[in-house]
Amino acid sequence: MTVEQDITRKLTEGLSPAQLAVENESHLHAGHAGSPGTGSSHFRVVVVSDKFDGLNRVARQRLVYDLLKVEMAGPVHALALQTLTPAEAAA
């Protein structure tokens, strides 16, 4: 299973999202100081979930990072997050 697939699976299981997009942007960061050159180090994630209701931006990001703690401790160097409730996504 790829890192992208692991991220998708864990966020799907943990957040039951109405919408989830995981994009591997590692190729955009090849050669920079923090890039390990693995091709699976930089990701952009957009997740829409009612589990974010009542949570501020920091709490939402902590929830995602907790679900992805293994990936963040290993292959993932950077994770750009957009975390929305269904109502925010609809607006």
Image: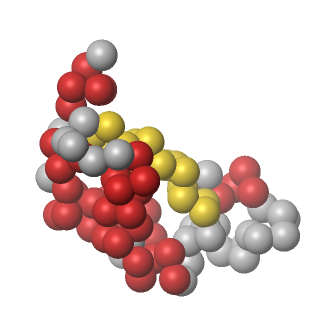
Q: Where is residue 12 in the image (x, y as percent from the top left)?
A: 21, 57
Q: Position of residue 88 (x, y in %)?
A: 29, 26
Task: Look at 17% across and 63% down and name the residue there.
Answer: 13
Task: Look at 61% across and 52% down and name the residue there.
Answer: 25
From the viewer's perspective, is residue 90 above or below residue 70? above
Task: Look at 31% across and 70% down and name the residue there.
Answer: 67
Q: Which of 29 and 39 is in front in this view?
A: 29
Q: Where is residue 69 in the image (x, y as percent from the top left)?
A: 41, 77
Which quarter of the image is occupied by the N terminus?
bottom left
Q: Where is residue 63 in the image (x, y as percent from the top left)?
A: 32, 62
Kindly indicate the quadrant of the structure image that contains residue 43. Answer: bottom right
Horizontal side, residue 41 vs residue 13: left or right? right
Horizontal side, residue 49 vs residue 37: left or right? left
From the viewer's perspective, is residue 53 above or below residue 75? above
Image color mode = secondary structure
Q: Nearer the viewer, residue 54 or 74?
A: 54
Task: Look at 72% across and 76% down and name the residue there.
Answer: 36
Which quarter of the image is occupied by the C terminus?
top left
Residue reaching furthest top?
A: 91
* Residue 33 seen from this side: yes
* Residue 20 seen from this side: no
From the viewer's perspective, is residue 21 above or below residue 75? above
